[in-house]
Amino acid sequence: ARVEYAYWAVQLDSDSGLTVGRTTFEHIATCAICPGFNRAHAGEVVVSGNTFIDCDHEGVDSHGGQNLVVKGNRFIDNVVGIIANDGSTIRIEGNFFDGNQTAISMNNGGNPTIIGNKIVGSTRFGIWLWEDSRASIAGNNIYGNATNIGLGRSPGDIVAENNWWGSAEASTIAYFIHDGNDE
């Protein structure tokens, strides 16, 4: 399917799960896939094999109590590709991000698993962890972003091992990570 010029493309307000696949979302005013604001879902929401282009807020938005799998999608030229809010359980795997302002953003205890993605060309952050957020970040290609990873008021150390940063040089890798050492 192709969904264009909508305010919200998919707004899930039931307790059931949902699978959204093989759809192009383009020129969406706010959120392309919004599983509901701070609403727990009994079922799993799977977003797989889609393309998100020019979403003015985010491609996929998740909130507390939601169980999401976002796998094998393309996020191109969005404000934010994926946002995980308020303790969402979200697995972000095998996606391609290019030209977004921020590819992946976590807020208020979001703790996603971010694995096997390619994150390039972000004009602000490849990954932005803020307000008590953590993440498991492994096996990704994260390079060519204004900032590869940004940490803002996140507790403790973030482990981001076995990723490709566009360089093997420690000083180059550190330059593109904004954390407490930069303050």
Image (cartoon, rainbow, N blue to C red):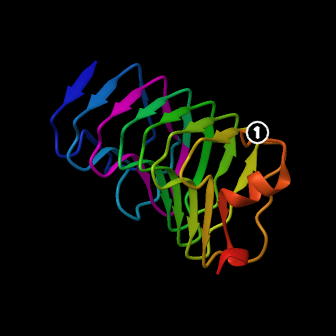
Q: Where is residue 15 drawn, in percent x and y?
A: 41, 50
Tell me where residue 93 sits by quadrant.
Answer: top right
Which residue sits at x=40%, y=19%?
22
Magenta-span inclusion, residue 64: yes
Q: In this figure, which residue is indicated by the disc labeled 1? A: 164
Q: Where is residue 176 drawn, in percent x and y?
A: 66, 56
Which residue sits at x=45%, y=60%?
63
Left or right: 178 in relation to 33: right
Pick whichever, 33 or 58, lies toward us: 58
Left or right: 121 in relation to 141: left
Pick whichever, 52 or 108, lies toward us: 52
Left or right: 164 in relation to 110: right
**Placement of the N terminus among the 4 image quadrants:** top left
Q: Residues within 10 Å of mark 1 (few under 14, many from 20)?
A: some
Magenta-span inclusion, residue 182: no
Pick whichever, 120 or 21, lies toward us: 120
* Position of 60 relative to 157 (above/below): above
- Which type of secondary structure does the marked residue at label 1 adopt? loop
**Placement of the C terminus among the 4 image quadrants:** bottom right
Find the magenta span and give its range: 45-68
Tell me where residue 6 sits by quadrant.
Answer: top left
Left or right: 83 in relation to 156: left
* Position of 93 relative to 101 (above/below): above
